Image (spheres, coloured by chain):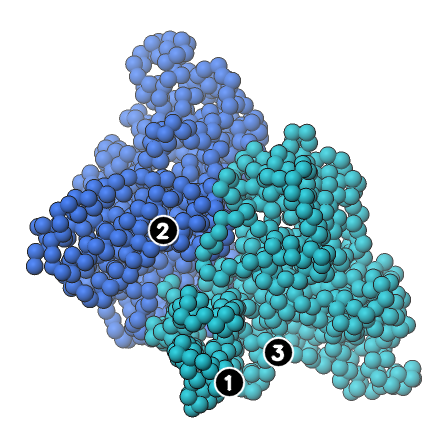
Chain colours: A blue, B cyan
Amino acid sequence: MTAGRRIYWRFASSAHRVLLAVIFSSIVLSPVIADVSPPRFQLMPAPASLRLGDGRLLITQTFSVGISGYKEARLERAARRFIQNLSRRTGLPISFHLSEPMKSTLVIHAEHASQPVQELDEDESYTLEVTSSSANLAAPNPLGVLRGLQTFLQLVQVTPEGFAAPAVRIEDKPRFPWRGLMIDVSRHFMPIDVLKRNLDGMEAVKMDVFHWHLSDNQGFRIESKKFPKLHELGSDGLYYTQEEVRELIAYARDRGIRVVPEFDMPGHTTAWFEGYPELASAPGPYEIERRWGVFEPEMDPTREETYRFLDKFTGEMAELFPDAYFHIGGDEVKGKQWDTNPKIQEFMRAHGFKTHRELQEYFNAHIEKILSKHHKHMAGWDEILSPGLPKDIVIQSWRGQKSLAEAAKQGYRGLLSFGYYLDLMHPAFEHYSVDPLGDEAGLLAPEEQRLILGGEACMWTEYVSPENIDSRIWPRTAVVAERLWSPQDVQDVDAMYERVEAVSGELDELGLTHRTSEMRMLRRMAGTDDIAPLVVLANVVEPLKEYVREEEAKKAGIELSRDDALNRLVDAVPPESETARRFARRVNNFLAGDSRGGAAEAEIREQLTAWRDNDAPLEPLLQRSHLLQELEPLSQKLAALGNAGLQALDYYDKGERAPAEWTALELSFIEEAKKPQSDLLLMIVPSVQRLVESVTAANNTP
Amino acid sequence: MTAGRRIYWRFASSAHRVLLAVIFSSIVLSPVIADVSPPRFQLMPAPASLRLGDGRLLITQTFSVGISGYKEARLERAARRFIQNLSRRTGLPISFHLSEPMKSTLVIHAEHASQPVQELDEDESYTLEVTSSSANLAAPNPLGVLRGLQTFLQLVQVTPEGFAAPAVRIEDKPRFPWRGLMIDVSRHFMPIDVLKRNLDGMEAVKMDVFHWHLSDNQGFRIESKKFPKLHELGSDGLYYTQEEVRELIAYARDRGIRVVPEFDMPGHTTAWFEGYPELASAPGPYEIERRWGVFEPEMDPTREETYRFLDKFTGEMAELFPDAYFHIGGDEVKGKQWDTNPKIQEFMRAHGFKTHRELQEYFNAHIEKILSKHHKHMAGWDEILSPGLPKDIVIQSWRGQKSLAEAAKQGYRGLLSFGYYLDLMHPAFEHYSVDPLGDEAGLLAPEEQRLILGGEACMWTEYVSPENIDSRIWPRTAVVAERLWSPQDVQDVDAMYERVEAVSGELDELGLTHRTSEMRMLRRMAGTDDIAPLVVLANVVEPLKEYVREEEAKKAGIELSRDDALNRLVDAVPPESETARRFARRVNNFLAGDSRGGAAEAEIREQLTAWRDNDAPLEPLLQRSHLLQELEPLSQKLAALGNAGLQALDYYDKGERAPAEWTALELSFIEEAKKPQSDLLLMIVPSVQRLVESVTAANNTP
């Protein structure tokens, strides 16, 4: 690092938040970035510390990589992948060969090997120094190198002189050691290539655990050689061979990602029972479940045969999955089958068990011993926690930080997934605001806080197919990754959204389909490429949140299942409307600034006019397709909202109160427009409401 | 086929051209298709005959396929792939299993096996009958089934009732037996996955020959076990292993595609000589050529060792490639090395050879014997033709139909590639107008015409990378495919463009990147997602045609080579501007209709205004990036063209002649704007010129 602007931008220090804002902020609302200022950093997750140097390192065709220090094949593959990605980011034909460190543009230096099987507490820190002539990436072990290479890629930007990385010194390490993504491949099977591209995405944002939810009521997705009827009868033929599993684990290891398998038990097990009904608590026969929900079939925890089976089965899987952790699920055990099985009832009486919970604790204790014998630490959802279990287990909480805090107080380690459920379709800023050490966990003593290992974003797949999974996971998972990697006080939401956009482009380059699949699906719905008015509508809606899609179906007397096609607008649009978010910002700024008739108002009017006038061209398109017909009311509501907003602006401009009848009418329509329609929400409603309310009696007096 | 509208639409019959136009035409200029008429057929290539029935076959989740008649694993794989594609086209979760023919939605019936190695003259015909309750696909052998499955997929459209295929009876077969695509993997290496997705594209448009240009001055791209220095020293490490080659051949066979390898000789052979300089006519040493052009290194045709080497080498390759044809290139032999090698000169004198051509004929005759020994028919470019060769050879003509006609008159078979060179960046309609039996070939006697086997689209890759190759090949290659498959009188250009759009969407669904890569490249150039004004400019430019890019570089004293990055606007935009094409149609219709002040004029004005006003927002974007700075003059010219067009319309509306000075000034600017700039052409210039000329003295007199 040469001399120069030695401003020390420590991301984690609140004293430097202003500087941080300078680097990471300034969302641009207009479609054109009009400034030619030096590029902003678009790192995500933000590093622990960054110091800006002088100048920039130009990236040219002759860019080369050398490895000094510890060497291994994985590092060389990482360097090769890095060069491929650098080529892709720049379009430069950079060829890969390891060059002498002294002559290399980028020198990679790891001090020693990482563990043969990646461990939870391994050091992932690195130091990246870029000068105008070269770059150095140093780390204790290859994991830090993998992380630093991703940082370097994110530094590369186009400039008037060429592609370049700014001169910086970055010292970086993660805040939490467990930064995971869970994918449910049971409800909808995801082919290996879908998983691979998602591992690529995880690597880009420095996540380190792939949690593979491999079995559930709706499917058993892995080949078992010991119990072949598990996959033969439990999967509709959609399962991973053991060879594919090994390949995926190797693929993940190359990217510094651990693979933790989950076999949910004793509930969520219908798919096991088609092949092995004797494991269940009721006689069967069983069929793979195709519907969604929580179902009755549960393993029989009272029979020794169940444990002999699970011992053999987990033994087989423990050998296949090298990771030290093994997830047994353990959630949502309702005990209905237990209640109706006289033998189980007798067993409970004999053991003095009064609740299902006690019986599940008995089960968990057995399973824990089995796993321990196979050298695995047990992981499970909140429900597995019980005081008798050893302290090496890990509790994954879908319930919240309170649950984690309680576990930590008893000495148990935990992971947060509450607040990180991707299927609930929440916007990025909500996930961003959730901290594993927030709420009750924030009140823990430091040594208890250390038991909170991190968290996992969870992708449950009721309404998720290989076609739309990427848009459900990305880019929102990047903000979870930042929350788990970056210092706690990296919190600026506007800056986050700007960096999310950059990382989203990077993920698109890597082959993730979160950006491209929507347009493809819209064209399919319409049966034509000329879908401009459909895009206008699609841009302002979001899928229903939480579990409202189920509730709406229930109201309508429809039973949802895997047989439903996921080809409607609700399945195509991303969870978060960028257009609505930007519009809300515009309206808020406009109302705060109170600048009647200015450019901001003109922009808002233009947008409202486009919405008002969109129904006429959209209508004929909707008529052509069974998939679009349901959108007619939405399209009409959008037009009415555009109209209402424009009328409100007219009153606003005149400094007039709107007539009471008009206000009442519009506000009642707005309430109507907030309701779910075709499993979608019109996301501009609150902004239009603000405009309308701004001209009610109390507000728009001149 | 039930009774009903038994209109016989024979595509090839000129008597039915009007009906044909009804089915296949009506280009829609406005962004919205406003009619809700029954769907038009979007078949490409158009079938030989199609008869419309009553109703439509709805496609649902329960769609099933059964195979009656001849069975083989390839047919089952084809059926599985068909179901996957049908799922993708509809978004319906259709699961694959072969069902009983009696209970299947679609029954496939092949009478007998096809040849173990696909042959040139195999029957590819099929009959596809769709009724409102089921579909039957019958063919003499599996090749016809493969073709018919693609037709079925193209029949599926979205309707108000659901996805459906109209009731039809299609009897179809190709016009020519050799419908190929050549890809040059020497100048730029294309990874196997790039080739595979292009084979998928070929299957979709019923092409049947992949011509693999495997060696050239710039690289030797295949593993040779007998002469390993060929790939080790001749490829920069970028070559296909023999295992990959076998895999690709199997992949192609599954799609009814033959694989014909080309090893260009005795010229275009620099890459061979790095490992084996003794093959050359001058001592060397040699290095892989990185520049473009025609180079001196040539094999020494006078030494017996050359033939011993080639015998062993072609023997190895003949075993690897099962196809009966083996392409030896043979083009552009300059003989410079032969002239300067005294031994070769002496040899020529001794044999009485006066020209290089005679020496090359001597070489070809030897090679032909060697290939014949290895059971291969020789294929080569125009230059290999000489009367002494046996009649089983095939001449591929880059020179034109005249050359083919001459060969045919001598009894030689031929293929047309003249007019199908994709790298020359011609618009689709030009390729469409080229017929293997056009011009001189059209004058041949019927039995001579039968010697014209078809043609090949050729993708030479000087400026083509894995990133932009799909947009160079597709969708234009689909129109070559149609020319080679469909009856000769399928010629309606507007209808062709409409169907090209549909097929382009289908190719996008299959994973081809011709649609998605442009935006990705534009975003990379700009370093931001907010590229709206850049897209406006990109939409009206095309890459330079023919070899003008080279000529421009030469003028500027620049030597182009493989080291150049292909990341500029010229590399990103498609060969044909859809916007400019549509604008030209609008302007022509407007001027022909002479409807002052109507909707057509308003649309033209809107477009011109957008161009006139685009420079201001684009300018700051251009300043930010070294890749965009060169576009400043183009952007200014676009603005000026928009302005000129608007002024012309003002005169037009007033029924005034434009002042002579104005006209002179604008027309001279227009001439200037026609010149290449940044290797691009502004494609709206001719339309603006028409507008300006419409108000010159002679035209706009009231």
Please give the residue where the numbered disc 3 appears in the rendered image. Answer: B547
Cβ–Cβ under 8 Å for marks 3 and 1: no
Nearer to us of marks 3 and 1 is 1
Q: Where residue A368 appears, x then y in whole percent?
A: 39, 27
For the residues labelled 3 and 1, the Cα–Cα distance comes to: 37 Å
Please give the residue where the numbered disc 2 appears in the rendered image. Answer: A615
Q: Where residue A340 appears, x then y in whole percent?
A: 39, 12
Q: Residues within 10 Å of mark 2 (few under 14, many from 20)?
A: many
Instruction: Out of A258 and A157, give the one closest to the viewer.
Output: A157
Q: Residue at image x 64%, y 37%?
A: B131
Q: Residue furthest front?
A: B702
Report how many numbered discs are placed on residues in the image: 3
For the residues labelled 1 and 2, the Cα–Cα distance comes to: 45 Å
For the residues labelled 2 and 3, the Cα–Cα distance comes to: 48 Å
Please give the residue where the numbered disc 1 appears in the rendered image. Answer: B698
Q: Is residue A618 left or right of residue B318?
A: left
Location of residue B398 with respect to A699 vertically, above or below: below
Q: Residues within 10 Å of mark 1 (few under 14, many from 20)?
A: few
